[in-house]
Image (cartoon, rainbow, N blue to C red):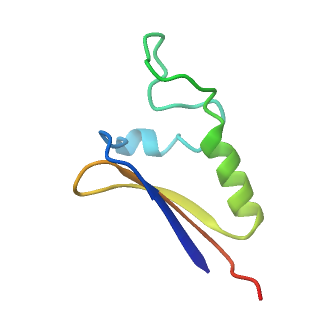
């Protein structure tokens, strides 16, 4: 398996939000006053692609702040 990790230095994602962020049309901030736009499909699409290739995807909050999204996929020869 090959592992990829993408991280940021933002406020992190709550444990509760991590449970639903891979569902289609779901976002951490679903309120009408949210400042970031988007449809909430990005991570759902990523999850579908990764799992279709036999991998796994997950989110972790980093100790120094921010969030890391990691995924693994098989390495083919």
- The answer to whether residue 28 is visible is yes
Q: Is residue 77 left or right of residue 32?
A: right
- The answer to whether residue 23 is visible is no
Quadrant of residue 76 in the image?
bottom right
> Looking at the rendering, in which quadrant would you find the N terminus?
bottom right
Q: Residue at x 60, y 32 (%)?
A: 40
Q: In this orientation, which residue lies closer to the viewer: 35 or 60?
A: 35
Q: Residue at x 70, y 62 (%)?
A: 51
Q: In this orientation, which residue lies closer to the viewer: 16 or 71?
A: 71
Quadrant of residue 60 in the image?
bottom left
Q: Residue at x 31, y 47 (%)?
A: 9
Residue 6 vertical position relative to residue 3 in the rendered view, above or below: above
Residue 24 vertical position relative to residue 56 in the rendered view, above or below: above
Give residue 7's position: percent from left, percent from top: 41, 54
Residue 28 vertical position relative to residue 55 in the rendered view, above or below: above
> Looking at the rendering, in which quadrant would you find the C terminus?
bottom right
Q: Residue at x 54, y 67 (%)?
A: 4
Q: Residue furthest left?
A: 64
Give residue 38's position: percent from left, percent from top: 59, 26
């Amino acid at each position: 398996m090959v592992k990829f990790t993408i991280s940021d230095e933002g406020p992190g994602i709550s444990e509760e939000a991590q449970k639903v962020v891979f569902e289609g049309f779901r976002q951490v901030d679903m309120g009408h006053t949210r400042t970031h736009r988007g449809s909430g499909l990005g991570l759902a699409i990523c999850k579908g692609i990764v799992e279709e290739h036999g991998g796994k995807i997950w989110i972790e909050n980093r100790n120094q702040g921010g969030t890391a999204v990691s995924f693994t996929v098989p390495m083919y020869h």
